[in-house]
Amino acid sequence: MIIQKSTNPRISTFDPDNFSFGNTFIDHMVICEYENGKWGDVKVMPYGGLPFSPAMMGVNYGQACFEGMKAYKDQNEDVFLFRPEKNFERINKSAKRLAMPEVTEEMFIEGLKALVDLDRAWIPQGEGMSLYIRPVIFATEEALKARIANKYMFAIVATPAKSYYTEPVSVLISDFYSRSANGGVGSAKAAGNYAASFYPTQLAIEEGYEQIIWTDDATHEYFEESGTMNVFVRINDIIYTPPTSEKILDGVTRDSFIQLAKKRGIEVKVEPVAVKTVIEAQKNGTLKEVWGVGTAVVTSVFEALGYKGEKLMLPSLPAEESFALALQKDLVNIQTNHAEDPFGWRVLVEKKILETA
């Protein structure tokens, strides 16, 4: 691994109380290039622009996938990653589906640790604060040919993060547009999946909703995901969530919520969730909560469901009665080292680079 430290770091200008999530980038990034059938050296280098051509195949033909993950700083200034091996496995699953070369553990895990170690000062402390990390693979070959590219780049960039979607949101149940289809790339974290979701989401916003609950492409009778999140439904005291499939992303937060719920003794059913069942439960008063989970948001509680021109309100539960908020607290406490980690999810980022520099 090659480490090139910035000669003009910007950390002194970073205000952890006043920054824009997604637009404020740390001082360094990870870059690794693929050419002639193999990956080159992993480089940790100053963050900045790179020279690309409009003929780059990733732009023209969509060979691009990414991950979303976080690093956390505890009260002792120790820094932790959360289940990074899951993101490593998933980015390779996505790459394989898009006919791109898989990355090595050294590139992903060690590159990640080196970057976070070097820029640990950028990780804000406090409730809801973290460093959001974006590993990405994309085709870089310059060629206007609809085929598998021969050149790629693996990169990791990161931005300080704070809580968003803090208030309950209203979501529109989609009865026309779909996020994915059988035989498609729904289970891959492909860049194009997100581009395709923007227009339907914009239509939902124009109707007065913040997000969409995606339904199956064949019948629109079953929940799949919500926005960029996996979705959970609580009817009485049972939690339901759709099974992962070739259409549904295998979310790390989703898996963590399921395990945490079982640890609490909450019954979880991983099975198809029918729109009809959810609407009937709302009508008869047994629908207690619907929420989405994901790395960026952690938990987004829904206050209303839009369906066929009707806005159906959900109960406003006290925090102590909410399964969604209880599980979110359990998860965040593990992530931030405020609780024991019986699952072995937390990964300490050792101080190596700064001490040996």
Image (cartoon, helix red, strand yellow):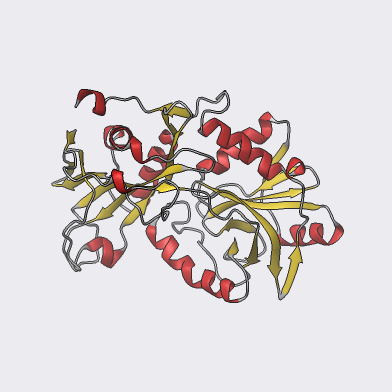
Seen from this angle, which residue lies furthest right? 284
128 vs 266, left or right, is left
9 vs 166, left or right, is left
Quarter of the N terminus within the rendering: top left
Q: Position of residue 271 (x, y in %)?
A: 67, 47
Q: Is residue 148 above or below residue 44?
A: below
What residue is shown at x 29% (from left), y 40% (from top)?
103
Instruction: Pick whichever, 138 or 260, lies toward us.
Output: 260
Quarter of the C terminus within the rendering: top left
Instruction: Pick whichever, 175 or 132, lies toward us.
Output: 132
| The quarter of the displayed image where residue 37 is located | top left
Seen from this angle, which residue lies furthest left? 36
274 vs 194, left or right, is right
Instruction: Pick whichever, 68 or 76, lies toward us.
Output: 76
What residue is shown at x 75% (from left), y 58% (from top)?
278
| The quarter of the displayed image where residue 214 is located | bottom right
Report the number of discs: 0
Q: Is residue 137 above or below residue 334?
A: below
| The quarter of the displayed image where residue 219 is located | bottom right
Q: Position of residue 139 (x, y in %)?
A: 24, 56
What residue is shown at x 28% (from left), y 34% (from top)?
118
Q: Position of residue 267 (x, y in %)?
A: 73, 37
Instruction: Pick whichever, 76 or 91, lies toward us.
Output: 76
Q: Position of residue 293 (x, y in %)?
A: 57, 48
308 vs 294, left or right, is right
